[in-house]
Image (tube, rainbow, N blue to C red):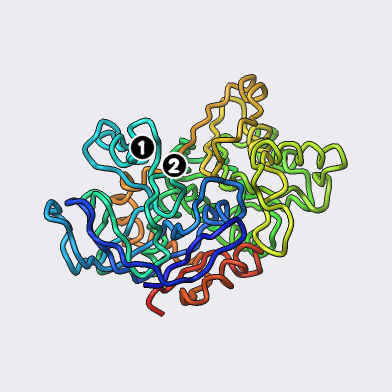
Amino acid sequence: MKAVVFHAIGDIRVEDVPEPAIEQPTDAIVRLTASAICGTDLHFIRGTFSGMEKGQILGHEGIGIVEAVGPEVKDIRVGQRVIIPSTVGCGHCQFCEKGFFAQCDNANPAGKRAGTVFFGGPQAAGGLKGLQAEKARCPFADTNLVPIPDEISDDQAILMSDILPTAWFGADLAEIEPGDHVLVLGCGPMGQLAIASALVMGGKVIAVDRLPDRLELARHQGAEVINFDEVDVPEAVLKLTDSDGARRVIDAVGIDAQHAHGGPDKPGLFGKAKEAIEQAIIEPTARKLGSHFVAGDNPSQALDWAVECVAKGGTISIIGVYPPTDRVFPIGMAMNKNVTVRMGNCNHRRYYDVLIEHVRSGKLDPVRILTEIEPMTGAIEAYKAFDEREPGWIKVELEPAS
């Protein structure tokens, strides 16, 4: 079958690979009808999140048709149309039973302390082959495959594999109450759906980015917008919040943040030197030169702004990805503001009941951020356009069978 395969930092290819097979009695094989490109995939390709091995199939977002099931699969049937949640849980351990599927005791072959398992990641994340392929093996199928109602289209469903649940998770972690000012850092695909989720929860959203097309989409959704190439972000947030700061902050950026290219927040020589030192410590393998797949230049930017801009006694929700090597956080400022910080990998399976109902009813329509649909044979060029943040390239769906 065809798949998008990682070879090295900055080097991915569409290749022929062996088809998956049932390995455990609780497995299912899904023939993918759509997958997608995510910013997390770029972290691996840029080297800002290390540990990827040559030959790994990329991708953790997928939907498709169940083609085969193991003998212990009871609820999922061959022929069903399903969402594949990005993170994997067994469904019956102490964490899964409490809804913490991303911290499952049994999914990771390295043991119960090993952490989150997701498709298309490093060996430390379970080593599962990814979903940018024509077929995939899905463990614990009864827990991890979600039947898609007929009223939900494939284009809507693919956005429910990862980014909509993760965005909703971010808004949930932020503890949004009606009328709260909610600051969303980053207006990429995750940020856009975090904005949508916060608005559904009754928040008054302020969105930060530097790219005009992303800021315009955020504005169209109903957010106040801040271009960090033009104004000082903390100062602008204070002006919009009666000098209080935002009661809730969602970091939808993560490790590949960029510093301002203009305006008062553009760093001087000292600031750039600090960023370079942080990069060398946090992401020593990151690709820093080249025409594509180059790491962001300020890994702690979103965290710094989050703590500066949050109101006293407020909540910061971190859903942007940071590698285990990152130990930089403004803890002193956060402590002195009595800030609550909540973060983690999304427990996708926990949120499908509410999200399916919201999408079915039209309360949330994730498809508004889907800007490109490309055949998997064109995945490399699509990755490059997404990596370069070309105008209009906000969320990219791949069609494996094309």
Up the image or down, 314 lies above or below 381; here it is: above
Residue visible at 70% across and 51% down in the picture: 226
The type of residue carrying mark 2 is: Ala
State left or right for residue 217 relative to residue 132.
right
Q: Quadrant of the N terminus?
A: bottom left
Q: Which mark is residue 349?
A: none
- Work out whether residue 184 or residue 54 is closer to the camera in this orientation and state it: 54
Q: Residues within 10 Å of mark 2 (few under 14, many from 20)?
A: some
Task: Classify mark 1: helix, strand or loop.
Answer: loop
Residue 109, quarter of picture:
top left
Image position, residue 231 (x, y; %): 78, 48
Residue visible at 40% across and 36% down in the picture: 115
Q: Earlier in the sequence, mark 1 or mark 2?
A: 1
Image position, residue 186 (x, y; %): 61, 50
| Residue annotated with mark 2 | 124
| Number of callouts | 2
State left or right for residue 171 relative to residue 239.
left
Q: Quadrant of the C terminus?
A: bottom left
Q: Residues within 10 Å of mark 1 (few under 14, many from 20)?
A: some
CA–CA distance between discs 1 and 2?
8 Å
Image position, residue 120 (x, y; %): 43, 55
Q: Residue furthest top?
A: 336
- Work out whether residue 48 or residue 262 is closer to the camera in this orientation and state it: 48
- Evaluate if marks 1 and 2 touch, with contact meaning CB atoms under 8 Å apart: yes
Residue visible at 59% across and 45% down in the picture: 254
- Work out whether residue 261 or residue 326 is closer to the camera in this orientation and state it: 326
Task: Classify mark 2: helix, strand or loop.
Answer: helix
Image position, residue 227 (x, y; %): 72, 53
State left or right for residue 97 relative to residue 327.
left
Residue 84, quarter of picture:
bottom left
Q: Which mark is residue 110?
A: 1
The type of residue carrying mark 1 is: Ala
